[in-house]
Amino acid sequence: MIEFVPTICPYCGAGCGILLVVKDGTVVGARPWPEHPISQGKLCIKGWNAHEFIYHEDRLKKPLIREGDSFKEVSWRQAIRSVAERLGEIRDKNGPDSLAFLSSAKCTNEENYLLQKFARAIIGTNNIDHCARLCHASTVAGLGEAFGSGAMTNSIPDIEEAGGIFIIGSDTMSQHPLVARRIMIAKEKGAKIILADPRRVQISRFADLHLMHKPGSDVALINGMMKYILDHELEDETFISEKTEDFEKLKEALEGLSLGEIEKITGVSKGEIERAALLYAEAKASCIIYAMGITQHTTGTDNVLSAANLAMLTGNIGRPGTGVNPL
């Protein structure tokens, strides 16, 4: 008997839907989930092979408990009882905040929710962390300060409605292939792709403009784009006056800059910076897509804030095909 069990791909953050193919109680394959809103019946090579680790020879299949310098196999019942007893002992002796819990992006939303609920409601501690908190700590701080929430401002399907797509710090085709598919759909509709990356990455083959700026010059590059937009009155004055704060501070900070200085800092020519600014500002709707190329950085929060400022300066927030979207 064959059945199909719906779940979420455990790899990148796109959250694609997969159907595990189960034959007589054994997972034998993975296939696309046709009705899933993100993947829409499509998968990348990682999703098609997401089940293979289940039967990998290196996978641990039984719990191990340390005895001296080695481990011994125990039953699941014994392992669960042992963990529960030790957690209870530590909490009772040292208090709930003596314990901490670490989750993973490889877990589903439901699994992560259950772990934080266990930490808070059962143990009584807020010491719950997650690998994405480190990867996107800059996003949480930067977008949180700019918009009040450290998450994507738009949905993944919204990307298809963009007329301009500014990608920075993301090799989207390698890292998030099903998101890259949305970018390519937008391109087929006429969207212009601006890529800012010091490397020649896969998606650079499809970019209308590739800005190969020096590593660490992300803020300067975006400042250069904003400087050109302001100098040529391409900003969205209505959006700025109605939806933003402290615009005059941004304007003052950019006034003393010249594109000649930006060119020296970034290694990107003045003409390319001008073209990038025009492609982004003049599109009917432009979105920004970024990943850990700008967040895992000494100036990560400033990088994210600069991206948010660029979006707000041009009114590219709050509409389909716009926004600041971390992956």
Image: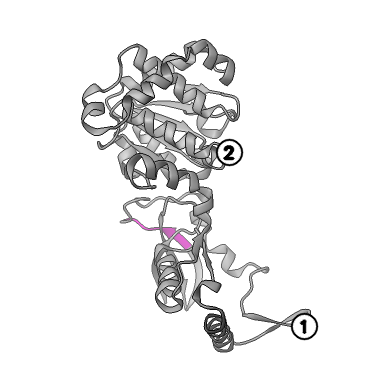
Q: Where does residue 95 sit, x and y in percent of width and height?
A: 52, 78
* Residue in view at x 57 percent, y 39 percent: 297
Residue 208's disc is none
Q: Residue at x 45, y 14 (%)?
A: 256
Residue 108 shows up from this direction? yes
Name the mark nearer the viewer: 2 or 1: 2
Q: Secondary structure at mark 2?
A: loop
Which of disc 1 and disc 2 is earlier in sequence? 1
Residue 315 relative to residue 288: left or right: left
Query: Counting other residues with Cα less than 10 Å from the Cα at mark 2, is it few (<14), some (14-19), or many (20 or more)?
Result: few
Q: Is residue 207 visible?
A: no
Q: How is the image coloured?
A: one colour
- Image height check: is 40 above or below 102? above
x, y percent for residue 253: 42, 21
The stretch drawn in magenta includes residue 32:
yes
Answer above or below: position of 228 versus 44: above
Name the main secondary structure of what is drawn in magenta: strand
| Residue topped by disc 1 | 68
Q: Amino acid at mark 1?
A: Gly
Q: Give the magenta part as a residue range.
A: 30-34
Towards the viewer: 302 or 190: 302
Residue at figure coordinates x 58%, y 30% from the top left: 216
Looking at the rendered structure, the number of numbered marks drawn on it comes to 2
User: Is residue 236 placed above or below 44 in the rendered structure?
Assistant: above
Per the image, the residue denoted by label 2 is: 298
Tell me the amino acid under the disc marked 2: Thr
Does residue 322 lie above or below 73 as drawn?
above
Query: On the rendered structure, is 257 left or right of 63?
Result: left
